[in-house]
Amino acid sequence: MARLFDPASRPDPYPLFDALRDNGPFLAMNGAMVVVTDHERASAILRDPAVSSDRRRSLVPGTLTAPDNDAPLSFLTMDPPDHTRLRKLVSKAFTSRVAAELEPTIRAIVAELLADIADSDSFDVVSQFAYPLPVRIITQLLGVPVADHEWFEGCGRRVAAGLDPAVSVNAPDQLADIHAAQREFREYFLGLIADRRRTPTEDLLSKLVLIEEHGDQLTEHELITTCVLLLLAGHETTANLITGGVLALLRHPDQLAALRTDPALISGAVEEALRYDTPVQLATRIVRKPTVLGEVTAPTDAMVLMFLSAANRDPAVFDEPDRFDITRDARAHLSFAAGTHFCLGAGLARMEASIALSAFADRVVRPELDEDSLRYRPHLNLRGPERMVVGFESVRT
Ligand code: HEM
């Protein structure tokens, strides 16, 4: 288990997952936590209405992934009925139509990013392609003014570090900065919300401000936490998916060739990229009664830590799970979780990744991965490269 927290394991954690899966669920943190790595149990726990997403009552001590004490919870870590009410209200502003309307914008941003590198012979996939796309989309969706984008992105990165349990273990000094960034973010959104109340526009924030159903409305705190949730959930995750997809295609040239020959394989390629290098590795739940998991019993209020990435390589569900195959049916993956907290942005993430990976396959001529450039972020949860240079001959217009 300690080796999983070690940043040295980021490039290839899969042999560790295999070993953990073979041994079944195990207790950690003096019995306050149970670690689950197999697909069947992870899937059942995610779908079990009796388990909780509210970590405040867990036996796990400290601030693992938690915001500072006065920060309100987002609905990601709430249970019904509060979760149901908030998710329903937010879903009204976050419909598939809203996501579909973004398609031309996504295409235009991808085209612009590729045009920007066209005069060069190499590019960093993370900072010049995979990261700017979801950041621009989510800031545009929320209605963050262009002038604030740079500050917003930097602050977002500091807040996102708080999603990682490895931070408390590897870099406790960083917690103060994460809490400061959370406060800066809240202040910022308070200003933006006041603005939209005075002058509503077409953006998601205005829609969230205006939402009302049977007298039910999002409070100011709920609005802020929802904005922060959408921002955090919506960018590093998608960036990791795009980078991981490009990496897998480059390391499996036969799959890249297959995609070029048959562009209709793109939706299968995105599902396989989600499975093969899972962008959000962890999901946690709290059991409210003693729960038998394999050979161990999780006590009341124990945290169940599920490695979605390990479940997605479970040979009981996926044949030859370590093989990257864009023609397989990978849809049983748990990359967007399952059950009541199933990712609200799955449609948007799939669309961004489809457009980005298709464009990469179609337009970047003779791409070549510089393996020596590949560096991973230390994050355990949002695992992904922080730098990945790819050389190329030209960019097709
Ligand atoms: C590849 C990209 C993405 C991945 C892998 C991903 C993954 C996940 C996962 C695993 C969860 C459930 C966490 C849990 O149950 O503990 C989740 C929830 C959520 N995601 Fe995503 N996500 C992605 C992109 C997005 C985007 C683009 C948005 C929105 C802009 C978004 C918004 C949300 C929201 C609002 C929730 C909370 C849902 C709830 O609690 O009911 N996600 N996501």
Image (spheres, grey):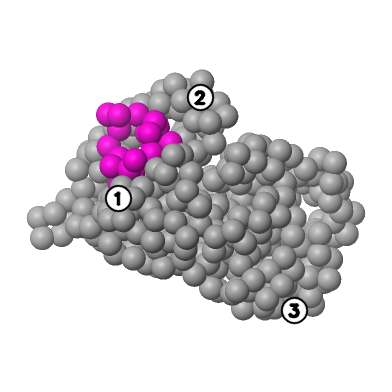
Residue 229 location (% of width, % of height): 39, 45
What residue does disc 3 label?
262
- Between the residue at mark 3 and the residue at mark 2, the CA separation in whole angstroms equals 48 Å
Nearer to me, 51 or 147: 51
Q: Which residue is mark 2?
A: 172
Q: Earlier in the sequence, mark 2 or mark 1?
A: 2
**Which residue was labeled with disc 1?**
300
Residue 21 lies in what quarter of the image?
bottom right
Write the residue at 28% across / 62% down. 50
Q: Label 1, label 3: how many angstroms apart (C-alpha)?
A: 51 Å
- Mark 3 and mark 2 lie on one chain; the one further toward the N terminus is 2
**Kind of residue at badge 1:** Thr
The residue drawn where x is 48% and y is 44% is 28
Cβ atoms under marks 3 and 2 closer than 8 Å: no
Tag 2: amino acid: Pro
Q: Quadrant of the N terminus?
A: top right
Q: Secondary structure at mark 1?
A: loop
Which region is colored magenta?
52-72
Q: Is residue 163 left or right of residue 285?
A: right
Q: Nearer the viewer, mark 1 or mark 3?
A: 1
Asked where in the image residue 321 lies, by quadrant, the reply is bottom right
Q: Is residue 63 visible?
A: yes
Please, what secondary structure does the residue beneath circle 2 have? loop
